[in-house]
Image (cartoon, coloured by chain):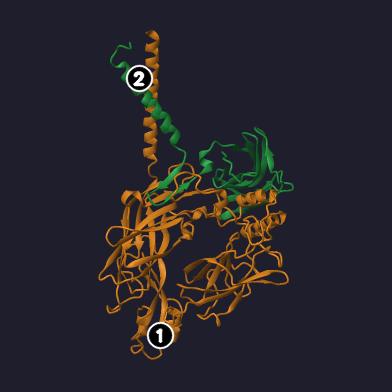
Amino acid sequence: MKNNKLFWPAVILAVIVLVEVVVFLSKTGSKSTVTTGEVATEQVDQVGQEEPVINFGWKEGEDMRTLTMTATKELVMDGMDLYVNFSGAENITVKEIGGQGNLIYSGIDKDNSRIVVKYYVKAMDGLKLIAGEAIDVLDINYQPIEGQKVTFSIDPSTLVVENGTVKTLPYL
Amino acid sequence: MKTGKIFLTLLLLAAVAGALALMKQNQDTRRGAAVAGANMSIVPAAKQLKRPGEELKYNVNFVLDNTNARVEAAQVKLCYSNHIEFKSVIGNKNAGFDAEAIAAVTKAADGNRICTTVAFGSNGVTSDQLNKLKNAGSIFEITFIAKTVTGGVKSISIDTADGVTVLGAYNPASADKTITVRNVAGGQYEVTDGSTPSPTGSSPIPSGQPSVTPVCRFVWRIMRDGNWLDASTKAAKTESVRGSGEPYCKEVKVCSGDNQLMVIGQDYNTKEECEAALGGNTGNAPVLNYKVSYRGVLPNDHKCMVDWPMQVIVLSRGTTKVYSNVIPNEVIDEAKKVVLKGSLTLTGFNYTDQVAVFFKGPKHLQMKYGVQNQSKNYNKAGGELVLTRDEKTSPWYDFSEHPMLPGDVVGKYVETIIGCREPPCTHREDSPQDGDINILDFSYVKSVVAKLETVPAGQNLKADLNGNCQANSADLYLLSRSLEDKQGQLY
């Protein structure tokens, strides 16, 4: 086998291809960059690129939904600017859950069909989230608009921030 | 022998699988190479005729061929002759861009050409303003000063060589943000010494000039023989041909794109009034005498509120001018508030009436002021302030009863790389304000308050909102009050 003239060239070629695969795949999808020789602007979109550590979910009831939040690992949150897009619903009211002692502002941005909730944890050591444990964040009551499909979704401009580091936490 | 055969077979199979993965990746990259194509233009395209010392203003516009795409960042390289000099550039906030450029770099090019590369982002665009991002519009307005006589018509162009002019799409779902610049159109200018008749003080809009996005601006017209003619500041002096009882000059609004000429604005009936309104002839710019205050800064307890730089923007009839690092002349401790008093000469701004002014402190939201003794939000377009060109006669406007709201200290983490190739090039401590008070500001202030950070008198601590040299719960309280006020205004 090894006496075959093609053995070592084939092995070397295969190794080169595999190295290329590893190098290329590790580079792609990390950052988007606009570069010139003079000015370069690099925007780090943390939400879109890192592994999510928070999963938002929904519980549905009759003309109401509850937004839940589950951490994939133990972390401490300082709060969030939450934006929920909606369509097919009107007369929306929201009730924040578990916000006692915290700063909470909420409203309906009718121009952009969006629920806005600012949920800021006053405790200096933040709010501890336990891995895998879902917490209810928000109750949304609404009236469906006849003939339209009701949808609620997290707007990508939502920010969840970690206590102490001021880092935005990636979510899904 | 057999082991070697199996090894080689597995290696080759892995290589084939890897090659297939690479091919797929390449295809994905190609598909994501551009989310849209763009045509870019410099407006006005028609020749601007100027004299040394006068300003030339251009808008750089874009139109995308994908109506679903929106632009969130732009880098544009403009090249022009060395007869004019770059003065300033301001981003179009109406299209979602920050007013302030990320960078503006001017370099000499071949021959007597000079190129200025400017980059704008939308970092200061809050989540509530994302809908401002557009698929067509102006990116920025750039101002040049005419320096020397050109001896003929010169061109200003957008340089697309080497991909230096690029647009970035707002595309949060993907890393794919590239917009391909397909066509560009430039503009023309001529600087004369005044011996050549100047038919216009600002560019006329030629008939049939195509422009996708109408751009409106104010120009001056002069009344001669019963007709409104184009006027420049100097041409407006010919009094002899003005008919009896006719106004001397007035301002008109001209829009490109639809070739609309709207005659609006005030008549100026005498030469003196006209020249004062036009500016430049008396040699004096309007003066803004102001009194402002910062919420939370208490009398006799602000040893660290020293020379906090403000940004001041003046506005009249759609024209704005930005003044950065404005330091008030005087700090006065009154019974219940601290008043910052100053006189700002509005160099480069020619309006003295219908003025509004925006103040923004170094850790504060921008506030708009439009009337004397304003004590609440001014929720109208434009403004009602009247100025003069003399510090002594210009009215003192007191806005201190409507203080600037503290709390805008940091923005979202953005790395800006200029002459740096080994991140981290910036630190969170340096992350700029984003024009909003949000969870990032709250968390930042909280993190500093948790450490009870203190600095000596005269120094600045970003999270110290009341300037008492310590970040403590009072600062967090101030931030929450600002939030409360802001939310109350929005919803």
Name the residue: 70% across, 72% down.
B334
Residue B226 position within the rendered picture, expressed as x and y whole percent measured from the top left: 35, 85
Q: How many marks?
A: 2
Quadrant in which the C terminus of chain B is drawn: bottom right
Question: Mark 2 or 1, which is nearer the eye?
Answer: 2
Circles 2 and 1 in contact, beta carbons < 8 Å = no
Q: Which residue is mark 1?
A: B248
Q: In which quadrant will I find the N terminus of chain B? A: top left
Quarter residue B214 falls in: bottom left
Residue type at mark 2 is: Val
Residue placed under numbered mark 2 in the picture: A11
Q: Chain A takes which shade in the image?
A: green
Hue of chain B? Answer: orange
Relative to the observer, which residue lies in front, A62 or B208? B208
Task: Looking at this view, name the residue that lies furthest to the left.
Answer: B152
x, y percentage for residue B301? 71, 64
Q: As rendered, which of B458 and B214 lies closer to the eye? A: B458
Q: Is residue A2 above or below residue B162?
A: above
Q: Circle 1 marks a residue in which chain?
A: B
- Amino acid at pointer 1: Tyr
Residue B136 or residue A78, whichever sits in front: A78
User: Which residue is located at x 72 percent, y 43 percent?
Assistant: A98
Q: Residue furthest front?
A: B456
The image shows residue A6, relative to residue B123, as above or below, that is: above
